[in-house]
Amino acid sequence: MRAFLLIAITIATASCTSEFSSFSEGAPATLDTANRAYYPNDEILVEAKAQFRERNFGNSYRLFKKAIDVAPEDPQAWLGFAASADMLRRFDKSDYAYRKLQPTIGNRVEFLNNYGYSQLLRGNLRTARSYFLKAYEIDPENEVTANNLELLRNSVNYQKRAPGDLKGI
């Protein structure tokens, strides 16, 4: 009986200092949180823009998506996400991003140029032209708008062909 009492006291004392005590600094209090995503600045956005400039659209798409997860109301992240999705021909994703952006920056030159370019990629030349002209009315000196209008003029001169039509050339 005395041995049983001694074991019971030892277990009770040990449990007060174990990691299961509510007052200890055991395992739950010292969990490693290094894998948690906290970004004190826009390092993801900077990297995403760099990947887009280098034409790594898959990487930029993934990084812009991560930037949206970190800052869901950032228009730069949404605009970059939409542009990356356009370049990957993921128009369902880019349309979602443009709908999200429309109420906040829908009248800005950047939005009008991007959405116009998206329409150009889809072959909707009239819609693209209307967005490029709206951007031109806001800022006639904008170089991107001028380039987009020139690209549109050149696109009208080329015929639409099915993929693979030029294999024999």
Image (cartoon, grey):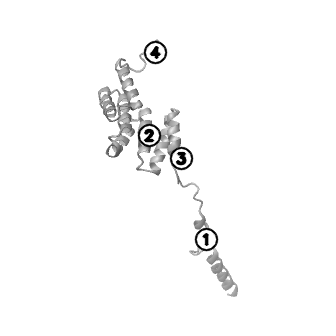
Residue type at mark 3?
Answer: Glu
Cα separation, mark 1 vs mark 2, equals 44 Å
Residue indicated by mark 2:
80
Disc 1 marks a residue whose amino acid type is Glu
**Dot 4 or dot 2, earlier in sequence:** 2
10 Å crowding of disc 1: few (<14), some (14-19), many (20+): few
Q: Is residue 125 left or right of residue 34?
A: left
Which of the two residues, 132 or 23, is positioned nearer the viewer here?
132
Along the polypeptide, which appears first: circle 3 or circle 2? Answer: 3
Pointer 2 local density, CA inside 10 Å: few below 14, some 14–19, many at least 20: many
- Residue 1 placement (x, y as % from top left): 67, 87
Residue type, numbered disc 4: Lys
Mark identifier at residue 25: 1
> For this view, does 39 lie left or right of residue 89?
right
Residue 57 in the image: above or below residue 68: above
Q: Nearer the viewer, residue 34 or 74?
A: 74
Among numbered discs 1 and 2, the one appearing first in the sequence: 1
Disc 3 and disc 1: Cα gap in Å? 34 Å
| Residue at image mark 4 | 167
Residue linked to disc 3: 43
Q: Is residue 158 above or below residue 135?
A: above
Mark 2 residue type? Gly
Q: Secondary structure beneath disc 4? A: loop
Q: Callout 1: helix, strand or loop? A: loop
The answer, for residue 56, to whether it is visible in the render is no
Residue at 35% x, 17% y is 157
Q: Residue at x 67, y 80 (%)?
A: 10
Q: Please state the horizontal and vertical placement of residue 90, each as a whole percent of the image.
A: 41, 35
Question: Toward which corner of the image does residue 130 lie, by quadrant?
Answer: top left
